[in-house]
Amino acid sequence: FIFLSSLSGIYGSVSQSNYAAGNTFQDAMAQYWIFHGEKTISFNLGWMRTIGIIVENEEYQRVREMGADMNQIEEEELMALLDIYCDPAHPIFPPSRSQLLVGVVTPRDFHFLPV
């Protein structure tokens, strides 16, 4: 089972605590099901550049493009992850690996930001 969660469950989300809480719940459910032997993962996704609410709302897109807390994710990248994790041969992870953070900014990313 794959949960499509959000990095807002990790970072929080200004004025959207209910959304962040819902994503945190999905992460906890993934960990619970893995603990009980089920093949489960929670993808904590950053913002999708070409699909979803960001594309449908120009103001959201401007805010995301100006933010430095998440990298954009391409549709092809999400599809590749789904191909990997939907493969029946993919192993069951321990509960400590129940989440996959996708689009998270690391210190290395700041090296490439324009000054």
Image (cartoon, rainbow, N blue to C red):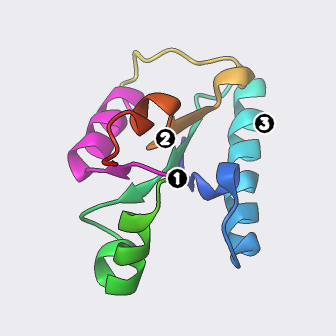
* Image marks 1 and 2: residues in contact by CB distance under 8 Å: yes
Label 1 is placed on what type of residue? Asp
Label 2 crowd bin: few (<14), some (14–19), many (20+), radius 10 Å: some
Quadrant of the image for the N terminus?
top right
- The residues colored magenta run 69-86
Compared to 27, does 57 lie above or below?
below
Residue 80: horizontal and vertical position, in percent? 27, 35
Report the magenta stretch's main SS.
Answer: helix
Q: Quadrant of residue 52?
A: bottom left
For residue 106, say whether it is visible.
yes
Q: Say which residue appears at 73% left-offset and 34% top-offset.
A: 31
Which is closer to the viewer, label 2 or label 3?
A: 2
Label 2 is placed on what type of residue? Val
Residue 48: horizontal and vertical position, in percent? 35, 59
Q: Name the side, left or right, on which 86 lies relative to 51.
A: right
Q: Say which residue appears at 73% left-offset and 53% top-offset.
A: 24
Q: Can you identify the residue that label 1 sits on? A: 69
What whole-number distance in Å separates the C-alpha atoms at marks 2 and 3? Answer: 27 Å
* Mark 2: secondary structure: loop
Q: Can you identify the residue that label 2 sits on? A: 105
What whole-number distance in Å separates the C-alpha atoms at marks 3 and 1? Answer: 28 Å
Q: Quadrant of residue 49?
A: bottom left
* Mark 1: secondary structure: loop
Residue 32: mark in rendering = 3
Compared to 53, does 31 lie above or below?
above
Label 1 crowd bin: few (<14), some (14–19), many (20+), radius 10 Å: some
Magenta stretch holds residue 74: yes
Label 3 is placed on what type of residue? Tyr
Q: Name the side, left or right, on which 76 lies relative to 96.
A: left
What whole-number distance in Å separates the C-alpha atoms at marks 1 and 2? Answer: 6 Å
